[in-house]
Amino acid sequence: MKITAIGVTLVLAAGGLAAQQDVRARLEGRVPAEVSAAVVAAATQAGAQGLPVDPLVQKALEGAAKGVPAERVIAAVQELAARLATAAGALHDGGVATPSSMAIEAGAFALTAGMSPQQVRDLAAVSVPPYDPATSLRVAGTLAAIGVPGKQVVDVVSTTIQAGLSQAEVAALPGSIQTRMARGATPAQAAAGQTRATATRPAPAGPPTERPVRPADRPARRP
Amino acid sequence: MSHELHPLVKLLLDGELRLSDLPPELKPEGERALRLLESIDHAPVALSPALDQRVMMAVRARATSRWRWLVQPRELRIHVRPWTLVPALAAAAALVFVVLRPAAPSTESVATVAAPESVTVRLVLHAPGAERVAVAGSFNQWNAAATPLLRSGTTEVWTATLTLPVGQHQYAFVVDGIRWMPDPSAPGVDDGFGRRNSVLAL
């Protein structure tokens, strides 16, 4: 048993070391040494928590490319790491036991765009298979970025899913709402109009066959 | 430097409105935009008459394929008992050893693997007076020199066509190598540094 534990520890340490080397290599020559050290530390911690590391590296590269002072880049990377952790927690609370990297990144994007952790949780809860929480959250973040208030973002995405429309139609929501905005509606009016139109639309006859269940009626997906 | 078109003018450019549908105060802007568009898209595109048929054949083949279930995305849940991890960890250790081992020199060219799902997008910036314009973003490691935009003829319009993996991307234009600006035609989010990034959700 002791040998197994030592083996596991060694393998995990080797994996962590390889990840650190990868992060360091990607930052080499692009960011100051202190930024690199801080990002490696943040990435190691994020990796240990099961969070994606790539967004942290990207944020550091972005800051350096934009000529942002090192201490501000480090602060932005640490803020992003915290946001990824918040997104992962909200997804977990929404019933996604092991959220994918893409879902966590999409959740962090939705938070950055102005959604609350509770709203991220609600969208995760409604995005049961065959719907992908990553797509729902990516769409939600985009809608928030174009000015749709968070509550209406949740309403329009949830209504679309609960009406049984396809995932492609969920992904097309920003385009539909922007078209309404181009005709003079405010983001809130456009989202409300889209929600009403979806709610009154007859349910499609074909797939998806597994109809989503409202969060309140649905048991937790945790094992 | 950049100019945000009125939403109704955008609809005009998309062919959803006619010039006569625009309110009088927008007509000059609409005419300017149409002239600009004409200067860009002067080469007619000829489509093969068999294109529709080929597209529909491909769509039908995809819809009726008995192997379609193999490529459809599904959620996969794996429940693991701790003791079953031992062989997996041993395999992982072997993999780490192989990966970290220095590679033998090779003269073979590297194969390019296409992204499983990608989308082609066209970025456009109206930047009067710019000498050069590039786009930097999460898709090119924020490299301000990696993806230059091309000037359309002698106009002030710069464009780039990119094939990007499905997902969410953030980006900004870099004008003359020093000035970062968001795409005026795309939604934006705070970049964490006091500026805005544009967002592409594909």
Image (cartoon, grey):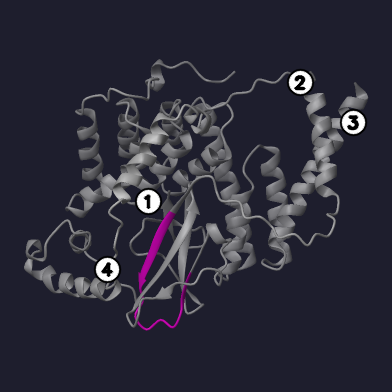
Percent coordinates x, y for residue A46 in the rendering: 66, 43
How far is mark 4 from mark 1, CA to CA?
Answer: 36 Å
Percent coordinates x, y for residue B4 in the rendering: 28, 67
According to the picture, the residue beneath numbered tag 1 turns out to be A145
**Image quarter in which the N terminus of chain A is found:** top right
Q: Residue at x 39, y 32 (%)?
A: B63
Crowd band around label 1 with a 10 angstrom C-alpha radius: few (<14), some (14–19), many (20+): many
* Secondary structure at numbered mark 1: helix
Q: Residue at x 26, y 46 (%)?
A: A177
Q: Is residue A43 above or below residue B33?
A: above
Labels 3 and 1: the sequence-earlier one? 3
According to the picture, the residue beneath numbered tag 3 turns out to be A6
* Secondary structure at numbered mark 3: helix
Q: Nearer the viewer, residue A169 or A133?
A: A169
**Image quarter in which the C terminus of chain A is found:** top right
According to the picture, the residue beneath numbered tag 2 turns out to be B82
The kind of residue on which mark 2 rests is Pro
